[in-house]
Amino acid sequence: MKFIKSLYLNNFFFYVLIGIIGLFVCAFIFPNMYNAVWLVVLALGTFLVLDLLILYIAKTGLEAERITPEKLSNGDLNPIKINLKNHYNFPVSVKIIDEIPFQFQVRDFKIIKTIKAATQKEIGYDLRPTERGEYHFGALNVYVSSPLRLISRRFTFDKDQMVPTYPSYIQLRKYDLIAFSNNLFQYGIKKIRRIGHTMEFEQIKEYVQGDDLRTLNWKATAKRNSLMVNQFQDEKSQSVYMAIDKGRVMQMPFDGLSLLDYAINSSLVLSNVILKKQDKAGLFAFSKKVENRVFAERRGSQMQKILETLYNIKTDFFESDYSRLYVDIKKNINQRSLIILYTNFETMDGLNRQLPYLKGIAKSHLLVVVFFQNTELNSIINKKTTTIQEVYDKVIAEKFMFEKRLIVNELKKYGIHSVLTQPENLTLDAINKYLEIKSRGIL
């Protein structure tokens, strides 16, 4: 039974069979061909038996192993590797059909390769998950054919393998060194103009080109007879909270990911930068109530705690309750902190409903509201209009884009900082805003 389940006839066998049928048809017209056609049938049967023997005589003709990351990175390309080892003493053709998790909806996965005799080969492909959670791989099916190509033998490996998908830790590694870099143009991060200094004096050092001339220490300069400057360091141990709105407004998808997942990925990367800058990173998510809380600390295990909390954020996309958010922040965050709120406002009416609570938060903390541009509207705005309906659509799209800019100005009137960004630029823009606030010393 196991032998029958692993045996498959290749297309080449059927092509030969169709050719033989054609020869039999010709034999009715030319009877002298009849015996020769039966010789062809005998030859096909002989090669078929020979193909069976050379494929099945070896108990372990081929070994294969699927190598996956310990966890997948949400929204990024994750490499999946397949190691193949050919134990046959002849080259084989392999067709790989990997049973990819159902979340990817890939129904035509197929890789065809040739492996030389008694050699090993590594084959790779990429997967881009767009949801957090558990991803279950099925069996790794490898169909092996000999040079005769009449039949295939199926080998099955690595059944029921589960890999969790976490927030984008690949982005986390990408920006890991950015907290220590003075070259803010790297990775597209803009240079920030420093306005003033924090009050934490570090040392007096010799002037080098690029130092701020306003920090010259004239007494030390006179004593050393060379230019000396005061060096300051950023204030440390300041609390920074990422507040993630997991309500209905964050359900909108862009490039396969919801706005909520973009916010989660950005929060993970930003938390790492915050901790590298010696500040305390914390987070919480809210919808109908405030939950998924991690208090701002600077422990060595803080990043792991944040990663696990972000992985477990789940929502039914209810309408978010900003009054609960305001009360919870007033109750649980006593020290003045930087609060980076990931949310989305599409209209001024939507902002005005929540503005009293945002103003209340901004009285005690430095509040930054991060919300999103609807990039889908750009194609409508930039499209050349030819009909009345297209004109209406373009006007409405421009109105929505204009309202986003009005929201930025309205928040600015009440001393609330804002970041209006495209989803794909969210991480960079959030890091920029945090570094700007640190540079200006306004927290």
Image: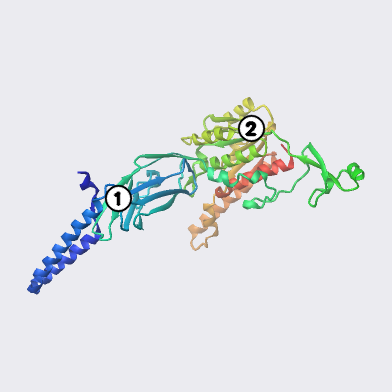
Residue 114's tag is none
Task: State which tag comes first along the sequence, 2 or 1.
Answer: 1
Disc 2 marks a residue whose amino acid type is Arg
Residue 92 or residue 131, whichever sits in front: 92
Do we see residue 410 in this rendering?
no
Residue 36 in which image quadrant: bottom left
Q: Secondary structure at mark 1?
A: loop
125 vs 338, nearest the viewer: 125
If the image is split into quadrants, where does the C terminus sit?
A: top right
Q: CA distance from mark 2 to mark 1?
A: 54 Å
Residue positioned 16% across, 59% down in the render: 45
At mark 2, the secondary structure is: loop
Where residue 201 appears, x then y in whole percent? 79, 37
Q: Position of residue 391 (x, y in %)?
A: 52, 58
Q: Which numbered disc, 2 or 1, marks the residue closer to the eye? A: 1
Q: Is 89 on the left-hand or right-hand side of 370?
A: left
Residue sitting at the far top: 331
